[in-house]
Image (cartoon, helix red, strand yellow):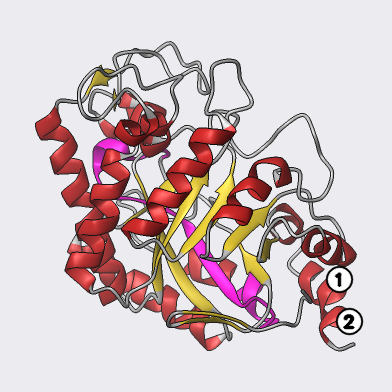
Amino acid sequence: MKITDVLKYKNIEFKNRIVMPPMATSKSDDDGHITDDVLKYYDEKTSSKIFSCVIVEHSYVDIQGKASKSQSSMASDSDIEGMSKLSSLIKKNGSLAVCQISHAGSGAKKEITGMDIVSASNMENPAFKNGQIAKELSVEEIHEIKDKFVNAAIRAKKAGFDAVEIHSAHAYLLDQFLSPITNKRTDEYGGDVYGRIKLHLEIIRGIKEALGEDYPVFIRMGAGDFMEGGLTEEDSVKASIEFEKAGVDVIDISGGMCFYKTKETYPGFFDTISKPIFDKVNVPVILTGGVTKGTDIVDILDRNVCDLVGIGRSVFKDSNWIEKEVGPLLNK
């Protein structure tokens, strides 16, 4: 496949194979509302009109799941106005606008939220190693969190986003349910991989029921922990297949308990966990990581490990990178 190839899946159309993945800016105000600084940042990063899709940094669905002081929010109807400005800006710059929704679970901080931290199980998060022991969520609380994800997705659609992405990577709450390292539950939300993704499937189906089958749902999946006792390739593939069955339209591959890094740094370094999923699902797969020059994108696509390539840190560091490195490749 080529960088310039259009990708159509159901009612989503990517004009090329290049995606801007979610990257936290910490530019929202203390209440999580979009500021002029946020809008300026996204305008600067997307004004080249090259990205086919821009996935906005994670927005918390509940104050208890707020990861950082200046994280954006999708937990309240008061967030819709600012988010509408952001989605309009991204679409004006020629990209699909996708809102990522998240709950940090035991990655949250009590000094920020004023609330106890929660997780799939009563334990410290091994990725954050902050000495905080999370409270295990009750089944009733899990149902409440499911509803908060669904309500956040409804707000995203109202704000004009073309799709919503569920954040289940980087050691945040849904990843804490997915990974056997952090999910030690013995009820229906634990055990084998099918129990560990029960909440994911309920959220996906809840969003589809609320917004219709045609509204696209992405999931960012921590498809590997790169730690002893972590998520296996077999379970990662099983989870991906179930996500597709439940209605997910795009799977966005990243790390789990290892965050978004591994010991490897070559372009597309998550290809070892992306390839098995890419081979088994029919939905588009995004792979991000390690791209430092435009030709890296070509190399990754030639490996047949994904459908779309995300360029994060290079663009984060240099707003002109995409035009300098990718512009010439699109014009060949």
Q: Are marks 2 and 1 in contact (CB under 8 Å)?
A: yes
Residue 241 lies in the magenta stretch: no
Rendered view: 25 above or below 181:
below
Q: Is residue 64 magenta?
A: yes
Span highlighted in magenta in the image: 43-68
Q: Name the amino acid type tagged 2.
A: Pro
Q: Is residue 71 visible?
A: no
Residue ID for mark 1: 325
Type of residue at label 1? Glu
The residue identified by callout 2 is 328
Q: Secondary structure at mark 2?
A: helix
Q: Is residue 240 visible?
A: yes
Q: Would you say 174 lies left or right of 254 here?
A: left
Task: Return the x and y of residue 144 as percentages of the image width and height.
Answer: 14, 42
Work out which quarter of the rendered image holds the C terminus and state it: bottom right
Of residues 64 and 240, the one nearer the viewer is 240
Image side of residue 226 versus residue 165, left or right: right
